[in-house]
Image (spheres, grey):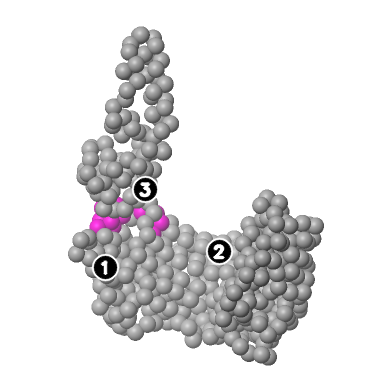
């Protein structure tokens, strides 16, 4: 107990100071009225603990790990009662690595202990299992999840948010029997908890199409449609699967009729899928996040009128594209159609030395189609073979709602100067500017000096109106 109290006492100092000041004022008033000595001003050492309101105790206990919470519960009956407050246990995040420790219980045991002790209070659950490196650890994880989810399925009826991300079930560490057993436990759990569930995140699951559709169907099973408003199935299917070509996926997605936010891969997009979204959740859908990786299927033909139909039925629809390794304009032009209401666009991880590749057609021909809707732009590529300063500046000036800029590319310092000058003259409206100026020299003293001059010239603008971060970066 002695090693626990000093740590919490430090946390309490800032929170309890106002209450201590009030108590001192009261003591001074009582002392003046009764002409008692100034010794009445002295408060006992444990005053801040004895008079601390419950709301402050709960605030402090939120910062404590389970081990310290268990110790705090042994201090007194009052603290033990506070420790069972539901708002201390409504959010829970478990990270599993499979490592054993002789000094404390394993991650799996902690999860099962929590489910049995406080699972009835749980509303937001997040489970992370990263880098499944061998079959033994994966089997232990599956066994722990079976017990953990079974206890929650029995005692919990208020879960609103469920995240289990980056399972990567297509890796060799998962045997077929263990994979099937884990998916079975998840399906049983979701059938029980889907009544109040509003947020569901299966990002990085990497399952087969039948397994994925069965898992999603468990949320909106039988005659009841799903209450899910936010669904994240980015990297949900195995990499080579073109989910857009399978009717089963479209039928499964049609069960989700209250979606306001959907995240998925471009391999899932087709005319049929867009038609399904327009028919099932057009009145609620506001955000559509689409990820497209260069190694995923992305050659399907999606017509502009399908996007236009969805956009017309969902008046507030915002489409955000995230491209990884896909930069050639001939491929992008088949995806980035003018009818799409694109609000955010990210082109990243494009470090290749193809001298025939050029980003200028994308900046000059494709992206201007979204001059009235584009609000966020992220660019990260190797353009060492060509200068894009003028084309990029022209695009920024053209987009009337562009408020966020993140650019990692080979640029000149004078590009930053021109950008700040146009911002000062209200010719553009960006509020966030994050730039890495790539250079092929290891020493960046020249660029540092020029940037300091530019920042000094526009210091008032940078300090008062911008979230500004610009540095030179050696790209060797």
Residue at 69% x, 72% y is 340
Q: Residue at x 72, y 77 (%)?
A: 388
Q: Nearer the viewer, mark 1 or mark 2?
A: 1
- Mark 3 residue crowding within 10 angstroms, few (<14) / some (14–19) / many (20+): some
**Numbered tag placed on residue 261 in the rendering:** 2
Image coords of residue 327 (percent x, y): 63, 82
Which stretch did the figure color magenta?
113-125
Horizontal relation, residue 165 to residue 80: left or right: right
The residue lying toward the viewer, choosing from 191 and 404, is 404
Residue 207: % across, % down: 42, 79
User: Residue 389: which quarter of the image?
Assistant: bottom right
Q: CA distance from mark 3 to mark 2?
A: 29 Å
Magenta segment main secondary structure: helix
Q: Which quadrant holds the N terminus?
A: top left
Q: Mark 3: which secondary structure?
A: loop
Q: Secondary structure at mark 2?
A: strand
Q: Which residue is mark 3?
A: 62
Task: Decide which of 282, 264 is in the foreground and name it.
Answer: 264
Instruction: Identify the residue shown where x is 41% and y is 38%.
Output: 14
Residue closest to the eye, 61 or 408: 408
Judge from the rendering whether residue 281 lies leftward or rightward of residue 167; answer left or right: right
Q: Which residue is mark 1?
A: 144
């Amino acid at each position: 107990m002695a090693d626990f109290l000093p740590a919490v006492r430090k946390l309490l100092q800032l929170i309890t100071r106002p209450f201590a000041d009030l108590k001192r004022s009261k003591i001074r008033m009582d002392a003046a009225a009764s002409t008692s000595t100034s010794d009445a001003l002295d408060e006992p050492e444990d005053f801040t603990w004895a008079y601390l309101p419950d709301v402050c105790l709960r605030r402090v206990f939120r910062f404590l790990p389970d081990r310290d919470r268990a110790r705090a519960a042994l201090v007194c009956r009052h603290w033990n009662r506070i420790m069972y407050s539901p708002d201390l246990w409504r959010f829970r995040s478990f990270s599993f690595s499979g490592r054993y420790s002789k000094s404390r219980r394993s991650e799996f045991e902690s999860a099962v202990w929590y489910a049995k002790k406080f699972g009835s209070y749980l509303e937001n659950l997040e489970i992370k299992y990263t880098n499944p490196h061998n079959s033994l650890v994966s089997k232990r994880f599956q066994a722990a999840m079976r017990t953990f989810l079974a206890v929650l399925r029995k005692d919990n009826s208020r879960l609103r948010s469920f995240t289990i991300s980056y399972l990567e079930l297509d890796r060799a560490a998962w045997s077929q029997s263990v994979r099937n057993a884990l998916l079975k436990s998840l399906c049983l759990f979701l059938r029980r908890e889907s009544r109040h569930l509003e947020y569901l995140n299966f990002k990085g699951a990497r399952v087969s199409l039948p397994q994925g559709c069965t898992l999603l169907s468990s949320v909106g099973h039988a005659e009841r449609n799903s209450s899910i408003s936010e669904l994240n199935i980015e990297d949900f299917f195995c990499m080579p699967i073109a989910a857009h070509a399978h009717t089963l996926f479209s039928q499964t997605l049609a069960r989700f009729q209250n979606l306001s936010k959907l995240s998925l891969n471009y391999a899932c997009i087709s005319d049929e899928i867009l038609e399904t979204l327009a028919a099932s959740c057009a009145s609620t859908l506001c955000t559509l996040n689409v990820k497209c990786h260069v190694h995923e299927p992305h050659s399907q033909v999606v017509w502009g009128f399908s996007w236009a139909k969805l956009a017309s039925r969902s008046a507030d629809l915002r489409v955000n594209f995230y491209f990884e390794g896909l930069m050639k304009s001939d491929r992008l032009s088949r995806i980035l159609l003018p009818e799409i209401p694109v609000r955010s666009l990210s082109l990243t991880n494009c470090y290749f030395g193809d001298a025939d590749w050029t980003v200028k057609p994308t900046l000059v021909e494709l992206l201007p189609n979204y001059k009235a809707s584009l609000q966020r732009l992220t660019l990260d590529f190797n353009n060492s073979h060509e200068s894009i300063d003028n084309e990029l500046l022209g695009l920024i000036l053209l987009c009337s709602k562009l408020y966020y800029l993140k650019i990692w590319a080979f640029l000149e310092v004078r590009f930053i100067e021109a950008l700040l000058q146009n911002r000062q003259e209200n010719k553009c409206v960006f509020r966030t500017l994050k730039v890495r100026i790539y250079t092929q020299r290891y020493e960046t003293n020249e660029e540092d000096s020029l940037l300091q001059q530019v920042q000094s010239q526009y210091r008032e603008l940078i300090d008062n109106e911008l979230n500004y971060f610009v540095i030179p970066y050696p790209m060797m």
